[in-house]
Image (cartoon, rainbow, N blue to C red):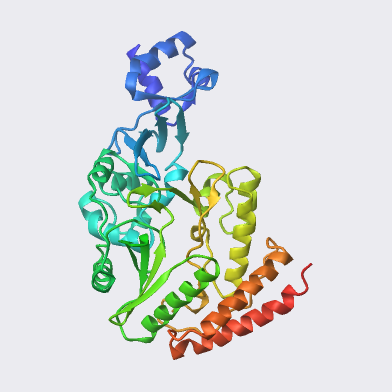
Amino acid sequence: MPRHSDSIRLLLGQGPMTSRQIIEKTGISQPTVSRSLAALGDEVVRIGSGSSIRYALRDTSRGFASAPIFRVSDEGLIRELGALVPVRPDGFVMVQADGVTLHSDGLPWWLFDMRPQGYLGRAYASTYAADLGLPANPEHWGDTEVIRALLAHDHDAIGNLLIGGLARDRFIGMPTPFLVDRAVDYPALARVAGAGEAPGSSAGGEQPKFCAHTERGHVLVKFSAPDDNPVSERWRDLLLAEHLALSVLGVETEVFDFGGQRFLEVPRFDRVGELGRVGVLSLRALDAEFVGDVSAPWPSLVSRLAAAGHVHADAIAGSALRWAFGTLIGNTDMHAGNLSFVSPHGRPYQLAPAYDILPMGFAPRSSGAIVDTLPPASLSASVDGETWREALHLAEIFFAMVSDCDGLSGSFSPCIEAIRRHIDEATSRIARLG
């Protein structure tokens, strides 16, 4: 029996298998396979049920035996969902509290957005990676390293999930969020963030930011550097332009200027009240699991997700309008991480409020070069003519707002002129759409 168990252990090290597959590969009889699997005990994780059940081998080399998963409700109440068990060769099995088991070859897609990423992810890694024995750049972390990091620290990640008992305990013991004194706290929090010690959520994105709690609720705060140079000036202008663009789309943000820095305060749609949370799934995560065409325009991806019942059908029109509006105002950074869905009650997921909508075509280049022009608008066929015309109306509202805005620098004037030309050129082509 030990010999058969050893053979099966080696076999399952290659990946999950059914009983029939084990029999075919080993030549062992069904009764012997059953007895050998039973002898392996907790080393084996069962996936599924009935005749389709598969067997996986626990991976004890990853630094944790299992990772409890908890969900925080919109009322701030915790419920355990189950535990994530590492299995060989490099996958995971989610053992749900109701007994259902689900296997994934890597990090489960619904945890994808919790990966430390972007500006805050790098700040997190700068602070904690060395102590955890992880690479300094979180982009180089594997799935297991991501789970180890979440187990060690992240009780305030984006969305409504907590990974591990430590995160659960920290959430339960977390004091009621205090209201910031913006004039004092925002410059201080910006300095901390710039030093690589940013507190709060690992919300994605590359622009400098931190998280705070105000009388408006939980917010994400983007900020410009305190430097007096063309690059900082351009980012100050872009933060104000984002404020105006989001207002056109019905998102209420606020802008504050303190000590030469500009701060854009954006409400967090994954937080409710002081402690409540809502699940968030980016289009990038949904695409990775259900579509696999990450370079496609938002409306194309959302249409396919809606057809399969993963997202609400009304998200098709909403995402198309945002895509078209962004195109018309010069937003050249509409990747799949900049559109998200909320999950208050499971599928189909609902389109989240807009964020990161601004004329990124004018963002300073990595070389420090300042750009005042836009490439011609690409009118994606995934957006119909009626939506393009609706977006054109919104773009005209945005143009009027930036034209009349006193908070923009004189250096942004050529950009406003470029937006005008950009809209005019697109208008002539939109007129030809049915």
Q: How many marks?
A: 0
- Residue sitting at x 24%, y 45%: 170
Query: Which residue is depicted at the point 37% across and 44% down?
Result: 75
Task: Residue at 40%, 45% (x, y): give it.
Answer: 74
Q: Nearer the viewer, residue 66 or 20?
A: 66
User: Residue 168's x, y, as percent?
Assistant: 28, 41
| Residue 116 appearing in the image | yes
Towards the viewer: 140 or 210: 210
Q: Tell me residue 337's x, y (percent).
A: 49, 58
Residue 69 at x, y = what percent?
Answer: 35, 38
In the image as oriented, which residue stretches furthest toward the bottom?
410
Q: Is residue 197 left or right of residue 420?
A: left
**Vertical relation: 118 (above or below) 113:** below
Q: Splitting the image into 4 quarters, where does residue 380 fall?
A: bottom right
Q: Residue 150: percent from the left, percent from the top?
A: 31, 47
Q: Between residues 171 and 230, which one lies in front from this camera angle?
A: 171
In this picture, is 78 found above or below 306? above
Kindly tell me whether residue 4 is visible in this rendering: no
Q: Which residue ends up furthest to the left in the rendered image? A: 131
Is residue 111 depicted above or below 434 in this figure? above
- Foreground of the two, 302 or 22: 302
Quadrant, the N terminus: top left
Looking at the image, residue 196 sits to the left or right of residue 313; the answer is: left
Query: Is the C terminus in the top left, top right, bottom left or bottom right quadrant?
Result: bottom right
The part of the image, by quadrant, that contains residue 118 is bottom left
Q: Return the residue found at the far front.
A: 215
Q: Quadrant of residue 164?
A: top left
